[in-house]
Image: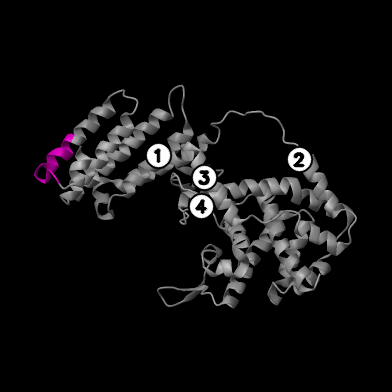
Amino acid sequence: MVETMLEYGLAKVHIRHIAEGLEVRATRLLASDAGSRFFAARRYLSIAKRCFGLERNYERCADIDCRISDAFVLEAESRISGEHRSYVVGASLYAEAVQALLAIPKHLRKAKGIDDKLKSLRQLQRDIAMQSLGDFAPMRGESLDLEEEIYSSEQEISGKEMAEALLALAECWPLASRKLTEVETRKRIGEFFFSRMFSSQKLATDGRVVAESPAASDLSAEDDEVTDAVWSKMIQDHVLRVRFGVQSAIAPALRQFARERLISTHDLVNIVGQSGAVPSERIGLMAKGLKAGFEGDFIVALHLLVPQIENFVRTHLKLKGAKTLTTEADSLQMEAGLSTLVALPEMDEVFGEDLAFEIRALFCEGFGPNLRNELAHGLLDAHAMQSAESIYAWWLIFRIVYQQYWYRNDR
């Protein structure tokens, strides 16, 4: 009823009395044992905040935000204690408590001790998130038999001349179709209720929340707008596709190639140089990175190749006339990073929408491997650098270079 009154501008004279009444109801709910008390109490409080906002009583609005945060904390404590505790839910609720406090204007935070509360809540969130990593009991299921796919990939490489074997390796797995990925993602959002109801988070191995996405609306394949929720689920689907592609095609093809022949750094320098895709001063670095991958050393390969793919993208965007420089406040011009470059409209024009999607999903997205940023900030450990996503990154860069070499030189 209060929401309807607010919508039509009614009861303005009594707005403070209404807000205080909602606060009282929220207090009673939080003290009760009702199953939905936390959700209902926060709803009362959020409407009370709207009422105080109409009076421009920002001090009371800040108080309400504190109470909303406290309600999230109470629910988090209830979810991480008792017989059916869930640390995953608890960590998420602590994150919501932090967001509620961040809504308070900065000039009001000091008097209310908000900065100390934020520090404490963030530490609790990290601690609970670390415990959430062990929330799930191990489950067993039937093993997935990829023997036929693996055999087929090996046969595509076996017995061929060097150049044709390299081409078979480069083309052993198709690039993801950006349009098809979006269509399939929208279809799943429409089919599955939980995708539309709940937001999602990605946790790092140390429990940090590194990516968040809102709940997805029920979008049809005909909608034009790609929301954050749809995009994040597209990236998650791509990660699953990457892992399957490496296990069933790329890794078997690479092993078969290594069993039958040895490719030298000199060969790779020639291939990279004649591809026409890599600036002359980067040919040696690119060749060494590719060589490390052929030897199975993806730790070295990633450290050499990830910076080169950023330079590769920047170089070709510049040739297209894209603006890759940013001007700082002190008039210094800085080169934009890969995360900025992949968002430029020229990406699709230069690389095609499928390859542009692959580069962005693999190197720059929080819900994906995010290899460029994770590597640049020293967050990838040795295990992560030997993962399916890392192997796929090496293979994608090899594919780009070798296909340019093959078709540029009339096969």
State the extent of the magenta-drawn residues as a range: 10-21
Q: Is residue 202 above or below residue 397?
A: above
Q: Which mark is residue 319?
A: none
Q: Amino acid at mark 3?
A: Lys
Q: Residue at x 76, y 73 (%)?
A: 408
Secondary structure at numbered mark 2: loop
Q: As drawn, is 124 to the left or to the right of 46?
A: right
Magenta span has 301?
A: no
Q: Which mark is residue 202?
A: 3
Mark 1–mark 3 distance (CA, rounded to whole Å)? 15 Å
Q: Earlier in the sequence, mark 4 or mark 1?
A: 1
* Residue receiving disc 1: 94
* Residue receiving disc 2: 146
Q: Earlier in the sequence, mark 2 or mark 4?
A: 2
* Residue receiving disc 4: 231
Residue 10: % across, % down: 14, 45
> Which residue is at the front of the view, 149 or 334?
149
Magenta span has 13?
A: yes
Dot 3: within a 10 Å radius of its alpha carbon, few (fewer than 14), some, or many (20 or more) residues? some
> Which residue is at the front of the view, 374 or 259?
259
Mark 2–mark 1 distance (CA, rounded to whole Å)? 42 Å
